[in-house]
Each structure stands twice: as structure tokens, then as C-alpha cells.
Amino acid sequence: MRRRLLNSGLSIALPLVLSMTLALPVTRAKSEEAKSSAMEVRVDNFTFALDTLTIPVNSTITWVNKDDVPHVIASSDGLFKSKALDTDDRYSYTFSKAGSYSYYCSIHPKMVGKILVR
């Protein structure tokens, strides 16, 4: 009787343990994917720290102004535009469609960057 109870307990517990173990890599992969979908571009010394960035669809980019002067992040096609960002201000935009998006600082037009969404 004891052996039968032990075997019956294993037959219930083993599939449960295996399913939990097999689910771990999927959960881990999703959290790594989530980490990569939020990125930051530093605005410093009148440049964009990453002037060209390739990201997956539905990723959010956050620009952070580290300069002592204001900057305005604006897309060349008018899709997005921030308010004037003072030091340590942030502006975020989520790219929901694949494509190439050029942007610049509308106060300092020589500052340019590009987001490639795949």
C-alpha cells in the first residue's frame, strides 16, 4: 500500500515539476525581451549618445537631456516632438511600426539621429 501511494504521488508530482521547469526558459526569455524594448538615448554635449539605433517594433525610446541647455526632440516627418527638455528632463516615444525614423533637435538642427525599427 505504501509503495502504491508513493508511486501515485510521483505520477502526479513529476509532470508538475517538469512543466514548471520547462516554463522557466520561456519566462526568462520574455523578461529579457521586455528589458530590450525600453532604451535610452542621452543628449549630451550637443549630440545624441546613440545617433543610430536599431530596435524591435513596439519599443520605447526615452531621450534624456544631460546638457545645460534645452533641446527639443523632433522627428523629421512630424510624427513626434517633445517639449523643450531642460537638464535631466525626459521624453519617450513608442515605435509601433517598422521603418526608418530620422530625428533632430529643432533648436540645434545639426544634432541628428535615426531610429531603425525592425
Image (cartoon, helix red, strand yellow):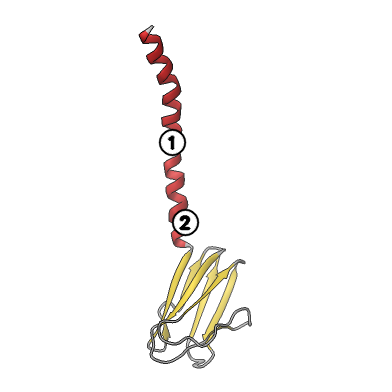
Amino acid type of the residue that numbered disc 2 sits on in the rendered structure: Glu
Q: In the rendered structure, which disc, 2 or 1, sits on the residue that comes first in sequence?
A: 1
Q: Residue at x 50, y 66 (%)?
A: 55
Which of the 4 quarters of the picture holds residue 100?
A: bottom right
Where disc 2 sits, the SS reads: helix
Which of the 4 quarters of the picture holds residue 78?
A: bottom right
Mark 1, other Cα within 10 Å: few <14 / some 14–19 / many ≥20: few
Q: Is residue 103 above or below residue 106?
A: above
Q: Nearer the viewer, mark 2 or mark 1?
A: 1
Location of residue 92 in the rendering, given as x and y in whole percent from the top left corner: 52, 74
Location of residue 104 in the rendering, given as x and y in whole percent from the top left corner: 52, 85
Where disc 1 sits, the SS reads: helix
Residue matched to label 2: 33
Which of the 4 quarters of the picture holds residue 86?
A: bottom left
Q: CA distance from mark 2 to mark 1?
A: 20 Å
Direction from residue 98 to residue 62 in the image, left or right? left
Instruction: Pick the residue in front: 26 or 52.
Output: 26
Residue matched to label 1: 20
